[in-house]
Amino acid sequence: MATTVLSSVQSAVKHWWISLILGVLYIIAGIWVFQTPLASYVSLSIVFSVFIFVSGISQIVFSISSRNEINNWGWYLAGGIIDLIIGLLLISHPMLTMAILPFYVGFWLLFQGFMAIGLSFQFKSIGVASWGWLLFLGFLTLIFSFLLLANPVFAGLSIVYMTAMAFVSAGIFRIFLAFDLKRLNNILD
């Protein structure tokens, strides 16, 4: 099992910087949302739509470029396709998106949180020391997603702040993941 996980991680290790870029983008999006709370709810639908679309494209590119190195690369591809479809739906229906934004954000963050938790356990199985932080940040992302899904009608401005905090926590997770992947890259080289 450890060899399967290691071979799956080897490709991600080569492209560690993709996770770093995504983490920085998540944090920038979170800070922007914190700084513009009133305008953010209106523009959040557009920014979030584009962000999810770009995230989907980058995950698809990663999975296709790593298909020879990762045993289960189809899961990465599926996640990218899901993000791409959600991004397209959000871009094409901005008014509807504003009405149901808490559900879109909540379910997307739910998926990201479960992915983070799964990756942390994979890292634990191959002996990465900081797997616990990745697990913690994955659970933090899940908590924010549950808060958004539990209060979609009442969300109002709270969705802006919860979304900002969720983006920041997901961004921190991605940055931790990137540096762990980089460390693994140095070990494997």
Image: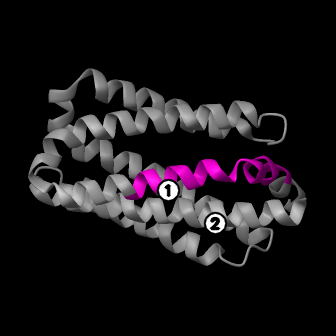
Q: What kind of element bears circle 2?
A: helix
Q: Position of residue 5 (x, y in %)?
A: 80, 56
Disc number at residue 119? none
Q: Residues within 10 Å of mark 1 (few under 14, many from 20)?
A: many
Is residue 10 rendered magenta in the image? Answer: yes
Tell me which label, 1 or 2, sits earlier in the chain.
1
Q: Is residue 93 above or below residue 27?
A: above
Look at mark 1 in the image and give the residue it sits on: 23
Q: Residue at x 60, y 77 (%)?
A: 132
**Quadrant of the frame with the C terminus:** bottom right
Q: Which stretch appears magenta?
A: 7-27
Q: Residue at x 77, y 69 (%)?
A: 125
Comparing labels 1 and 2, the label whose residue is closer to the camera: 1
Residue 139 relative to residue 165: left or right = right
Q: Position of residue 85 (x, y in %)?
A: 43, 27
Disc number at residue 120? 2
Q: Residues within 10 Å of mark 2 (few under 14, many from 20)?
A: many
Q: Is residue 186 visible?
A: yes
Main SS, magenta residues:
helix
Q: Are marks 1 and 2 in contact (CB under 8 Å)?
A: no
